[in-house]
Each structure stands twice: as structure tokens, then as C-alpha cells.
Image (cartoon, helix red, strand yellow):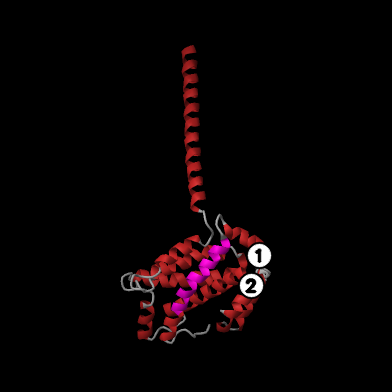
Amino acid sequence: FERKQKCVKRFSTFRSTTRDQLLSSVLSIFASVYIYEIARMEGTVFTPALEGMKDVKSEEGEMLTKPFLDVCKQILPVIDKFGLAMALVKSDVGGNITRLENKYLSNPSEFNHLYTMVRAEVEAKTAKASSSCTNGLLWLTRAMDFLVELFRNLLEHAEWTMSKACTDSYSKTLKKWHGWLASSSFTVAMKLAPDRKKFMDVIGGAGEINLDIEKFCTTFSPLLEENHKFLASVGMDDLKAS
């Protein structure tokens, strides 16, 4: 009986030691992952999009589909920080990215260049359909115009409230293309805009937020303007919301 007790005691000690070692290993792994995530998050919420913009053009200067859509995807976390005020914008942007991405994935080699899918729809006379990729690219570009103008306002008008910055940006970009219902819905949504200071603190991360906003506006604007010029060249830049 005494020998049995000793065996049980030794087994309990071994089990306890093994459990402690396992726990220590797990905690070490979590610590490593945490340190990696902190390092990865250095910079601002704009950092991934700014990196992605470097690869949007081919060597020949053509706009590439996947890199452009990836940049737009990387801007979604920025929109998220606005909360309910940007729910409509996020839904619209996300839907148009998905539409264009699905078309690209149907034949990546054929639709490697962004404007190829638009040319195909223009030729097939389907470009003006509300569900077309042409329509998706147009409204995705307009939504990005709005965001660029909004962040330019935040950079240049430190005294403006978030609501004023949003409303002014909307008036300069999307409003003329929207009908009464969409315009009214947007006006109501802007009343839910977050506090400006809290918002800027959230998107700042570990980087220079004002510097990244300036880079975002100056780098992304020419790409969006190129989209508009191409769409205008095929008569598709002046479509209004149906």
C-alpha cells in the first residue's frame, strides 16, 4: 500500500510538472504572436493601402484589376472606424468590390487589366445596366473620391467637426449623382459621425497620421482620376443613380 501511495505521489508530481511546462509553452507562443501582431500593426490604418498602391500599375502603365481592388479592400477598415455613419458607404463599396472581383476571377488572364471588363460590356452594350461591372467601377471610384475629399478636409480644416467634413465632402463628390432618397439617407447618416478627436486617435496607430493622410490623398487621387478619364472616354462617367 505504501509503495502504491509513493507511485501515485510521483505520478501526480510528474503530471503537475508536465502541465506547468505545457502552460508555460502555450503562454510563450501567445507572447510571440502578440509581439508579432504589435510589430505588424506599426504605422496607421492607411499603411496597407499605401503599400498596395505601389503595385496598382503594370510596367506598361496599365491599371491592374486585382491590385486596385486590393487597395480598395484595404480602405474598408478605415471606413469601419466611422461606425454607423458610413454603413451605407461600406455596403456600397464592398458590394462593388465583390462584383468586380467575381468578374476578374471568372477569367483572371482576360481581365487582368481593370478596363478590359468595361470594354467588353461596352462592346456588348450591357455597360449601362445597374448590375454591370462598368457601373460597379464607376460607383466604387466615386465612393473613393468621397473618402479622399473627406480626409483632405480633415487635413486642411482642423476646426471642422467630423459631420461638417463629411457633409462638405459629400456635396463635392457624390451628391450630384444621387437621387433624393439616397441624398436624404446620407444626410441622416452624417448625424451619426463620430467625434473627430476620438476618430483620429483610433486611426492613428503608431505612425504619423497626418503624413499618411496626405500620402493617401496625393497618391490615390491620380488613380481615381485615371478611372474617370477612361470611363468618360467610353461615355460611362456621367451615369446617375437609378
Q: Amino acid at mark 2?
A: Ala
Using the rendered image of the protein, determine whether residue 1 is visible from the camera's viewpoint.
no
Image location (x, y in percent) of residue 162? 65, 69
Residue indicated by mark 1: 196
Rendering quarter of residue 70: bottom left
Residue indicated by mark 2: 165
Using the rendered image of the protein, determine whether residue 232 is visible from the camera's viewpoint.
yes
- Label 1 sits on a secondary structure element that is helix
Q: Is residue 72 above or below residue 136?
A: above
- Label 2 sits on a secondary structure element that is helix
**Relative to residue 30, is residue 60 drawn left or right?**
left
Q: Nearer the viewer, residue 238 or 179?
A: 238
Q: Is residue 72 magenta?
A: no
Q: Earlier in the sequence, mark 2 or mark 1?
A: 2
- Residue 3 is labelled as none
- Give the magenta range: 209-227
Q: Is residue 42 above or below residue 70?
A: above
Q: Nearer the viewer, residue 109 or 32?
A: 32
Rendering quarter of residue 114: bottom left
Q: Amino acid at mark 1?
A: Arg
Residue at (40, 84) in percent of width and height: 126
**Relative to residue 104, is residue 171 drawn left or right?**
right
Label 2 Cα neighbours within 10 Å, binned few <14 / some 14-19 / many ≥20 = many
Label 1 Cα neighbours within 10 Å, binned few <14 / some 14-19 / many ≥20 = some
Image location (x, y in percent) of residue 178? 57, 82
Image location (x, y in percent) of residue 180? 61, 83
Q: Are marks 2 and 1 in contact (CB under 8 Å)?
A: yes
Q: Is residue 210 magenta?
A: yes
The dominant secondary structure in magenta is helix
